[in-house]
Image (cartoon, rainbow, N blue to C red):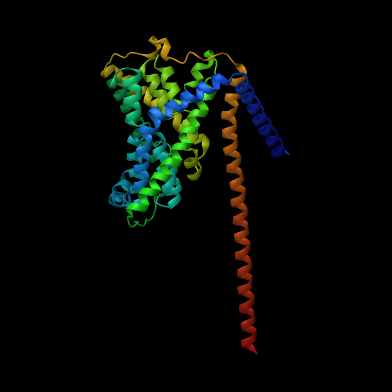
Amino acid sequence: MLEKHKNGIYSTAIIFVCVVMMGAATAFPQKISNAAKDGLELCVSTMIPTLFPLLVLTSFLLRSGAIDYPGRKADTIASKLFGLSGNAAAVFLISLFSGFPVGASLVSKLTGEGKITKSEGARLMTCCVNAGPAFVIGAVGAEMFQSRRAGAIIFASLTLSAVTVFVLTRFVMKSETAASFQTNVPDFSSSLVGSVFDAAQSMVSICGWIIVFSCVGAFVSQNAEKAMMFLEVSIGCKISSGYPLPVTALVIGWGGVCVHCQVFHAVVKSEMKKTTFFFFRLLNGVLASGICAILVRIFPCAVQTLASSPEKVSAAMTSNAAACAGLLLMCAILIVDFEETRGTEGQFSQKSFNLKNLKNLRKNEKTIDQERYFKVKHHF
């Protein structure tokens, strides 16, 4: 009965969101078109040039087996210091400089290949969703704040925050290291072709989410503009540029729901609880903000904010309460959907486990019957 009630609420919420979005798209086609163009322009001008080469490179490292050698060499040290395998430690280091979805993508692939355990993957997902220096120092620092020094301070804050969480999880989360891993024979041609395909597939997903949230953001009211800071990171950085640097560090450390959607496949593979993932994303943001506040006092820098240039801020935002409600419901539906999926997977695993036990029981009974038969036959 409760399950049917949940399904009814879930279906009603989806229908409501779809109706609201379809109505908005019909009533304001030009605004939707412009928002989609803005999202596409962001992808073409910033995301693809900065992320696509890194996605190809990291995928190539995995496919060619090149990451296995340094991972094997660092296995003993990483196990003693951090309670992780060498591969897991290498993924963490790469995630600090590669950008938001790259670290999560590495975790997902290595978990799927068995080179890191699911518990290691869960630990890595607490600290491997990081913004790269190209975005933080280049796009945020140089373009938004007109100061590379400001970008460097924010990036240092994010890095120190991720390292802090990485060390902290050594004591609060238990993880089993991978017993062993096989080194693949490098095949340059097939690895390169597969890497480009993987990177293109990931890039399509990333750009798709950015365009969707750009369209939704066009209907967020000016009063609810602050909420948009925590939904899409690039828009959030533009809005937070009118505030002190620690606010921008908080926004990037949190990552935004758009980035969370891009990396949820890795969360599911590592069997990490969604509430745990969100808690550590918030913790990353708060730590980065606090560290940034300290660094700004030590290394003060003057910045030019976008708030002083009204034409650069998203001024096309209009009041639309229904669209805001629809946006919040989209986030709620996303969480509920993953929880339902996890519950279904758990039921399926339990059924599989029970079926396996039943088969083993029948096998044991058959063996006992055979032993009895041979004993009787030997007796006669």
Q: Nearer the viewer, residue 210 or 333?
A: 210
Task: Tell me what residue is drawn at x 39 percent, y 33 percent.
Answer: 48
Q: How many marks?
A: 0
Q: Position of residue 159 (x, y in %)?
A: 33, 31
**Left or right of 34: which side holds 59?**
left
**On screen, residue 79 above or below 326:** below
Picture quarter with the C terminus? bottom right
Q: Residue furthest bottom?
A: 380
Judge whether residue 84 can be spotted in this image.
no
Q: Quadrant of residue 168?
A: top left
Picture quarter with the N terminus? top right
Q: Quadrant of residue 312?
A: top left
Judge whether residue 210 can be spotted in this image.
yes
Task: Tell me what residue is drawn at x 55 percent, y 15 percent.
Answer: 221
Q: Position of residue 142 (x, y in %)?
A: 31, 21
Q: Position of residue 296 (x, y in %)?
A: 30, 18
Q: Position of residue 118 (x, y in %)?
A: 45, 47
Q: Nearer the viewer, residue 286 or 373?
A: 286
**Left or right of 316: which side holds 98?**
left
**Left or right of 289: which side holds 336?**
right
